[in-house]
Image (cartoon, rainbow, N blue to C red):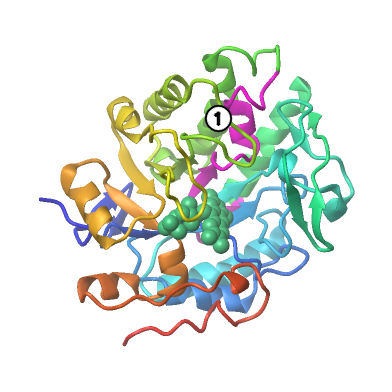
Amino acid sequence: MTTLFDPIKVGNLNCPNRIWMAPLTRGRATREHIPTELMATYYSQRASAGLMLSEATGISLEGSGWPYAGGLWGAERVAHWRKVTDAVHAAGGRIFAQLWHMGRIVHPSLHGVQPVSASATTAPGKAHTYDGRQLYVEARPLAIEEIPRLIGDYVTAARNAIDAGFDGVQLHGANGYLIDQFLRDGSNKRSDMYGGPIENRVRLLREVVQALIDTVGKERTAVRLSPNGDSQGVDDSNQDALFPAAAAELGRLGIVFLELREPGPHGTFGKSDRPPVAPLIRKAFKGILVLNSDYDFERGQSAVASGAADAITFGRKFLANPDLPYRFANNLALNADDQKTWYSQGPDGYINYPAHG
Ligand SMILES: Cc1cc2nc3c(=O)[nH]c(=O)nc-3n(C[C@H](O)[C@H](O)[C@H](O)COP(=O)(O)O)c2cc1C
């Protein structure tokens, strides 16, 4: 029977366990989206994860809307990410870069331009900005002529990620950001070849993933989706049809793993009354399937033992427990995470969670 402590091969990487670290935005880069030394310390502390997914990292200025989040465009950012990946590898770890375009979630106060999306829609609620929380503004629909340029931005970021020493890339297709805004009919109102029927709404995902595969190889290309229910105002009228179709397409393209973030009705970071789509996706997608949201050790073990998942990503537990695999293996108590320091700058609540050994 498979356990969380069993190794798993991910492309050419030998991951020593199935206790993976979920992507976590932490806001410790500079205002110019350049990674810092603190980030090298933080990730290297967590190198015992079977695999780490980096914090969501902007592919371009247009796609970056989170204060002090890292970016992956330009030589200076690549050089500073190299220090992070070198520290991770020196500590024996593995790390993929999560590639992020936020679409309509980018607030214009960050870079002075109107955000882009599938259609002219406005996200509900308020954006994180350098001047506190501010209402979102209406997005400008991407013109069809702009799509090749957008795909080019993903390609450049992926090439930069590999140049910076990442072991692979994960396309952020989840949580109501740009790819998700194209996938789901609540935010995609287009009437061209990128809107309407499912095959059209999946087109951007497919084209970006194909371009990433052409750039870094399928063994280094992964995807994250969040199928069950609303994410930042993005939702679909038929999730059980859309997401298995998208997953089947990703399987045909041959991505190395698919991660699903699916909170339950009692989720502690997002909730959903809709059932998870993971069981349907498991049938539609034959590659490595990674599950996330509110997993603890027991639930994670049983998901892997039953064959529902091949690995589990832990978010807040890894944030607060740099030595999470060791704690799980030795049945040790876990540190609680401190929400006040999730996105604060500086070392507190970032690199000072106690660890064993
Ligand atoms: C502080 C924080 C930052 C997050 N940042 C990201 C992110 O950058 N990219 C992403 O896909 N999800 C992000 N998430 C969602 C997590 O990856 C994960 O889906 C969520 O925390 C649920 O998993 P958990 O119950 O193991 O914490 C974030 C969550 C938290 C708490």
| Residue 236, x across and y down, in percent | 55, 25
- The image quadrant that residue 55 belongs to is bottom right
Mark 1, Cα crowd under 10 Å, few <14 / some 14-19 / many 20+, is many
Image quarter of the C terminus = bottom left
Q: In this orientation, does residue 162 appear?
A: no
**Residue at x 71% of width, y 27% of height:** 118
**In the image: residue 139, left or right of residue 8:** right
**Label 1 belongs to which residue?**
205
**Residue at x 34% of width, y 71% of height:** 324
- The image quadrant that residue 124 belongs to is top right
Q: Is residue 351 above or below residue 160?
A: below
Tally of numbered discs = 1
**Residue at x 64% of width, y 69% of height:** 80
Q: Is residue 36 above or below residue 184?
A: below
Q: Which residues are magenta?
A: 160-189
Q: Which residue is most to the right?
A: 112
Q: Is residue 73 above or below residue 81?
A: above
| Residue 101, x across and y down, in percent | 66, 44
Q: Is residue 233 above or below residue 1?
A: above
Q: In this orientation, does residue 121 appear?
A: yes
